[in-house]
Image: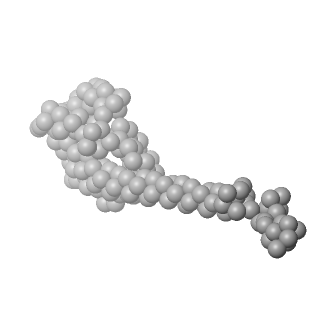
Amino acid sequence: MSATDTNATEPNATDPSTATSTGAAPRRRTWPVAVLAAAVAVVLAATAVLGYRAKVAGEVESARTGASSAARTAAQVVLGYDYRRLDSDFGRSRALLTGDFRNKYTQTVTTLVRPTATQTHAVVVAEVRSVSVVSATPDQVVTLLFVNQTTTSNRTAGPRTDLNRVRMTMRRVGDRWLVSGMTGL
């Protein structure tokens, strides 16, 4: 073999297609790995967002159910009273109220309801016919209640029933739902 024949069989060091393990490795393409990593990140972010939304939706549904039940009970207690046991009735009512509304309620029953109920021997029974939810978050629910209030007193010949609509705002305080606002409609 001649010197020229030996050179013909050796790989060309300047040709990248003939590089060996002892030479420089060919350049790898990294964009498929980057695209795959970005896709995984998008899927994980979407899963997190959907999971959070499902959690909040569950909390809102639980709030709707709990607050509706508490509003039904509270309306019957707060909107009913008997002149023979006003202190007890008003005390039970105050236990179901919170915030500024509790103070307003106390002022109203002290200055208006107590004197009138005592004078007229009023007995008011509140019966909640229906409750619906107007809006809800995990910590506050606004309800609409249809309440029949039947009043007997020494000013009427027989019982009188008033059909009322009441908007009641319920606020979560600890593990309880309390009335934080009430408006007759």
Name the outermost residue toward the bottom. 1
Residue 159 visible, this orientation = yes
Q: Nearer the viewer, residue 69 or 32?
A: 32
Q: Residue at x 22, y 31 (%)?
A: 114
Q: Position of residue 70 (x, y in %)?
A: 27, 50
The mark tally for this picture is 0
Quarter occupied by residue 69: bottom left
Residue 165 visible, this orientation = no
Q: Looking at the image, is 184 positioned above or below residue 12?
A: above
Q: Looking at the image, is 112 positioned above or below residue 52?
A: above
The answer to whether 178 appears left or right of 46 in the picture is left
Q: Nearer the viewer, residue 20 or 110?
A: 20
Quarter occupied by residue 109: top left
The answer to whether 134 appears left or right of 126 in the picture is right
Position of the N terminus, as image quadrant, is bottom right
Q: Position of residue 162 (x, y in %)?
A: 33, 52
Q: Residue at x 50, y 59 (%)?
A: 47
Name the outermost residue toward the right. 4
Q: Residue at x 23, y 34 (%)?
A: 94
Q: Position of residue 13 (x, y in %)?
A: 80, 59
The answer to whether 25 appears left or right of 89 in the picture is right
Name the outermost residue toward the front. 1
Q: Residue at x 32, y 42 (%)?
A: 172
Q: Position of residue 91 (x, y in %)?
A: 17, 34
Q: Nearer the viewer, residue 77 or 179?
A: 179
Q: Looking at the image, is 15 positioned above or below residue 156?
A: below
